[in-house]
Image (cartoon, grey):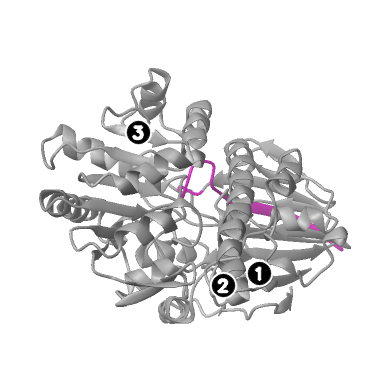
Amino acid sequence: MRINFHGAAHTVTGSQHLLEINGSKLLLDCGLYQGRRADTYERNLNFHYDPKTVDAVILSHAHIDHAGNLPNLTKQGYEGNIFATRATADLGSLMIRDSGRIQESDAEFVNKKRAQRGEEPIEPLYTEQDAEEVAGMFKGVNYAEAFEPIPGVIARFYEAGHILGSAGVSLEIEEKGKKIRFWFSGDIGRYKMPLLRDPILPEAVDYMIMESTYGDKSHSNPELAYSEFRNVVKLTVERGGKVIVPAFAVGRSQELVFYLNQMMENGEVPRVPVYVDSPLAVNATEVFKRHLECFDEETAKFVRESRHPALDFKMLTYVKSVEESKALNENKEPMVIISASGMAETGRIVHHIKNNIENPKNTICIVSWQAPNTLGRRLADREPQVNIFGEIYKRKCDVATIGGLSGHAGQDLLMKYALGVKDTVKQIFLVHGEEKQAMTLKGLLNERKLSQVHYPELHESVDL
């Protein structure tokens, strides 16, 4: 058996791990790399293997950095199944179609600027039609249900607690008479977060690929994060400004709406309009309602009765059209705008930032991890000016960062996750983390006598 680390190695985006087993190839995730714009196009377009030779894909969850490059995989010859939980299959179909629309829209906008400068137009990375082709390839599977993606491998999904439908992947592998218990963490969620069930931790595995995004720090508890977010909203609204939140359309957006509803119902912040400006979020909300199996019984009851506080909220408006989105930037009244993407790299959120960054009344609120060289990271680092669509904007607004709202496990849970397999594991591979974070986690695990921890390079191959 061989593992090839073709993404999320020494970085947090572009998850893509190719397993070679019994002469077959099994791909775990196929995500978009997000970073410096000059690098992303070529890196996402060119695979380090022939997609036609891949026999099956297993998808841990629907976020674009894990699922967003599937259209390129199929364009270049992949014809097999894409195995995922039933909720991920539904969300993944929505999200990659939305990504295709965004790729086309952003290319069109940039090409207008390029034409003005006499430059050649660029092609979108892929189109909505390309993404449409992928939707029919998903094969939904229940949690804990056994399936055989390739000969000699029995796979199961287990709750990851990261977003709706997210899963850790268990593989029981038999190769040349040898049996291996393998685990891929996907993105690990957190305990006691709103809406989702707690993550299930691995037990008794031989080899594990594990994320390490927050390997250098534990999160503040959700109650403190709630308090910090409440203060940001209160101060901004009271000075007549807008709160602009880049957030993933699936997961973070619903949690933020949950919190805002609670704040306004309790009189903790003034009642102001809350806009979720993402066509994807509208459709994703319907997916939430279809997948009651992902919730505990209390939450499922709320959803069935159409009164779930994250899905039905008096001050909430889901913005569908481009015209409605543009009107928000012309409206000078206090409001909260939640819009994708989470790293502020594509979509309507970029336009909201562009139109609001130079107003000192406003606040851009960063609520999730930001990859290097993204607009979100530059804002989180509070750079005095940023480049948006080829033009320079001075940052006059406030920037608030709230780490406790992250959907990723902090250092404490990552340690628990890894140490739970200490007695059986032969090797842990840390992925989905920058060097500082991953090496901090590796050092702590070594101190706890778990020495077999490796931080693979991009495109490194390891034989087991």
Q: Is residue 337 magenta?
A: no
10 Å neighbourhood of mark 3: few (<14), some, or many (≥20)? some
Q: Is residue 173 magenta?
A: yes
What residue is disc 3 on? Answer: 317
Q: Residue at x 29, y 74 (%)?
A: 382
* Residue 427 image position (x, y, % from top left): 61, 73
Instruction: Give the magenta range.
Output: 160-176
Give the structural element (helix, strand or loop) at label 1: helix
Q: Is residue 424 visible?
A: no
Near-viewer residue (137 or 204): 137
* Residue 232 image position (x, y, % from top left): 18, 55
What residue is disc 2 on? Answer: 37
Between the C-alphas of marks 2 and 1, the distance is 7 Å
* Residue 315 image position (x, y, % from top left): 26, 32
Between the C-alphas of marks 3 and 2, the distance is 32 Å
Q: Is residue 414 above or below residue 443?
A: above
> Mark number for residue 41?
1
> Mark number for residue 116?
none
CB under 8 Å between callouts 2 and 1? yes
